[in-house]
Image: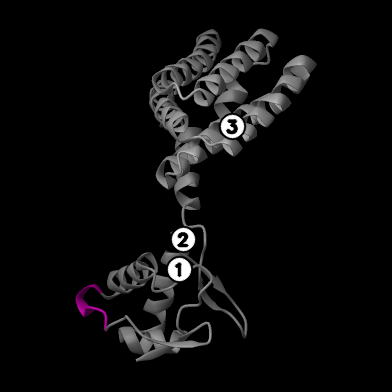
Amino acid sequence: MLSNVNGKEKQSSFRAARQNRIFQDVVEQIQEAILRGDYQPGDMLPPERELKENFQTSRGTLREALRVLEQKGLIEIRLGVSGGARVKAAVMEPISESLGLMLRYRKISLAHLTEFREDMEGIVTAKAAERAGRADIENLEKILAEALKMVQAGVERWKDFLDADKSFHRSIARITGNPIYIFIHDMIHDNIQPYYDIFLPPDQKTLEQNYTDLHEILDSVKSRKVSVAREQARKHVHRFNEYMNAQSRTDV
């Protein structure tokens, strides 16, 4: 059967769902079509009537399957005359939200986070030292120039400095050019703020030490000292987490 996607007819990739597992099969077929690239972000899925015919299923089963796909972040369902199921561009939001919930419920301890971040930051910084171009270095220098202003202003710019630190690390990850590193790195940094709020009180010495760490990391990336960059990144994260560990012990 032909379906219409963005004004263009295309052959449907859907078949009648297996009757012994019809709901699950509908979900899996649509999910696979999206992940395979049959439907790109922004595309509308075929109309409900057409999907019912393709899958040979009821309206209720189809709508429930679409709701599951919406919860997974693969589609968004719009109501109204021009509504329907549209493929979403960002399908990773639910994963990041799940990590955030795990952090809030303390299913991931500070020790777990420390171990993972030391390894992750070491890897991405080493790769950045291998792959950084002139524009990448200039961007990092610009971030550090702003961070220095915050250090000089003192602890009243504490949160601004943490944002600059986050921006520096995210920029390092982007230099790798590897979307897996970038996504996992961003997901961690997007969800770590609650730990900072609880276990990392404002302190001028901490500001200055962490700025020094970032500056040394930049120097190693700029000079392509891969192994040195890796160890400096690990030590930077370790020091940051030692501050938090010390505070967590005093709070017990």
- Other residues around mark 3 within 10 Å, as few (<14) / some (14–19) / many (≥20): many
Residue at 61 percent of width and 31 percent of height: 140
Asked which colour scheme the image uses, the reply is: one colour
* Circle 3/circle 2 CB separation < 8 Å: no
Q: Residue at x 39, y 20 (%)?
A: 227
| Amino acid at circle 1 | Arg
Q: Kindly identify the amino acid type of the residue bearing the numbered disc 3.
A: Ile
- Tell me which segment is drawn in magenta: 16-21
- In the image, what residue type sits under mark 2? Gln
Question: In this orientation, does residue 199 appear?
Answer: no
Which quarter of the figure has residue 24? bottom left
- Crowding around mark 2 (Cα neighbors within 10 Å: few <14, some 14 to 19, many 20+) is few
* Residue topped by disc 1: 67
Q: Which residue is mark 2?
A: 71
Please state which of residues 146 and 225 is positioned toward the viewer in this rendering.
225
User: Residue at (26%, 84%) from the top-left corner?
Assistant: 16
Q: In the structure shown, which secondary structural element does the residue marked by tag 3 occupy? A: helix
Q: Tell me where residue 120 appears, x and y as whole percent.
A: 41, 30
Label 1 and label 3: CA atoms lie apart by 45 Å
Q: Is residue 140 left or right of residue 217?
A: right
Between label 1 and label 3, give the one nearer the viewer.
3
Asked if residue 232 is positioned above or below residue 170 in the image, the reply reads above
Spatial CA span between label 2 and label 1? 6 Å
Answer yes or no: do the residues labelled 2 and 1 have beta carbons within 8 Å?
A: yes
Query: Which residue, given by chain and number where applicable, does mark 3 sit on?
Result: 137
Quarter-of-image position of residue 213: top right
